[in-house]
Image: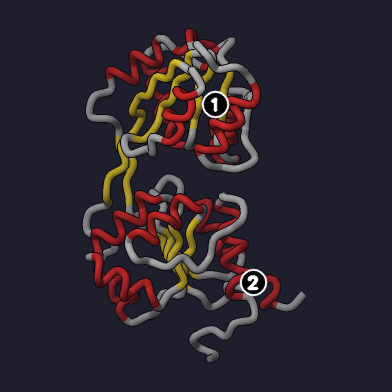
């Protein structure tokens, strides 16, 4: 195997916009492929302004038929408040748990929880379809601990199927102040960033807002924008940003691999 085959991102500078807690996984995967990753979180994960609704949901957790986790952040936030109340995973005995994506499932396992349903496609629409296919949801109580800006598609679909859905804000997603910083902005202006990765629609929106709409479109036009999935890619498109790389499965591992496949065989700026 040649060096280029083993490290298709050798000589490429890749910007990672994930929140700080989640960035290392993608950074490490990109580095294995030879990239020079730069962690520049475009968003931050912070607690709800009012934790009482989340605490109430934790207190009543055992009364739900399903708890649906759509991100590792939601798992961490929910379990932290459960622990703060002096309760642990045992409080969820008898409750079925659905996880969207392997990262969410892995985080649940780290907390000692079993995942009962993990749809093959890692998006809200697939979650609702899998839940509806597995059981009659009419009258079933379903808890959704989610981000404050989560899309309404999932709870709307579950309610349409007759479920009694409780949505609760487990965490807030806010723009990172002063993104991307003077040094990284200079690299973007000098067109020395080969690729920018986005793993959420909120990161795209935050980045574009921070740069300014027109400048964001201009700066990202000459780099490779890699989106983790269709929801993120759609958010980029709505803001005038073209996604050039999107994996067929919506994981960070697949995102890094797709980026490597995109650059494989292409000359670097230094060798062009």
Picture quadrant where residue 220 is located: bottom left
Q: Nearer the viewer, residue 127 or 43?
A: 127
Can you tell which mark lies on residue 7?
2
Q: Nearer the viewer, residue 165 or 175?
A: 165
Q: Secondary structure at mark 2?
A: loop
Q: Position of residue 60 (x, y in %)?
A: 41, 9
Q: How many numbered discs sit on the rendered protein?
A: 2
Q: Which mark is residue 111?
A: 1
State yes or no: discs 2 and 1 in contact (Cβ < 8 Å): no
Location of residue 16 in the rendering, given as x and y in whole percent from the top left corner: 43, 60
Residue at 34% x, 13% y is: 56
Residue 16 vs 128, above or below: the answer is below
Residue 189, x across and y down, in percent: 30, 78
State the residue in front, 162 or 141: 162
Does 58 appear above or below 169? above
Which quadrant of the figure has residue 211? Answer: bottom left
Residue drawn at (45%, 20%), measured in percent from left and top?
143
Location of residue 169 (image quadrant): top left
Mark sitting on residue 194:
none
Q: Quadrant of the N terminus?
A: bottom right
Which mark is first along the chain, 1 or 2? 2
Alpha carbon separation for disc pair 2 and 1: 34 Å
Residue 28 to residue 48: above or below: below
């Amino acid at each position: 195997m040649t060096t280029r085959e083993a490290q298709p991102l050798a000589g490429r500078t890749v910007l990672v916009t994930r929140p700080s807690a989640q960035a290392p996984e993608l950074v490490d995967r990109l580095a294995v492929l030879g990239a020079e990753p730069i962690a520049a979180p475009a968003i931050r994960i912070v607690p709800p302004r009012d934790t009482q609704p989340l605490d109430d949901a934790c207190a009543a957790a055992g009364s739900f038929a399903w708890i649906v986790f759509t991100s590792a952040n939601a798992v961490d936030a929910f379990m932290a408040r459960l622990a703060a109340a002096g309760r642990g995973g045992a409080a969820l005995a008898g409750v079925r748990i659905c996880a969207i994506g392997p990262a969410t499932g892995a985080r649940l396992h780290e907390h000692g929880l079993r995942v009962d349903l993990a749809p093959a496609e890692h998006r809200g629409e697939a979650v609702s379809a899998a839940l509806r296919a597995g059981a009659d949801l009419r009258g079933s109580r379903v808890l959704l601990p989610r981000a404050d800006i989560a899309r309404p598609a999932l709870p709307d679909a579950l309610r349409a199927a007759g479920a009694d859905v409780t949505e609760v804000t487990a965490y807030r997603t806010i723009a990172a102040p002063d993104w991307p910083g003077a040094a990284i902005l200079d690299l973007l202006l000098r067109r020395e960033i080969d690729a920018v990765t986005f793993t959420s629609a909120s990161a795209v929106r935050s980045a574009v807002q921070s740069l300014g709409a027109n400048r964001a479109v201009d700066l990202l036009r000459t780099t490779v924008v890699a989106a983790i999935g269709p929801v993120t890619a759609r958010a980029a498109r709505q803001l005038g940003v073209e996604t050039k790389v999107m994996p067929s499965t919506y994981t960070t591992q697949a995102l890094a691999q797709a980026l490597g496949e995109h650059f494989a065989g292409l000359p670097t700026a230094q060798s062009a």
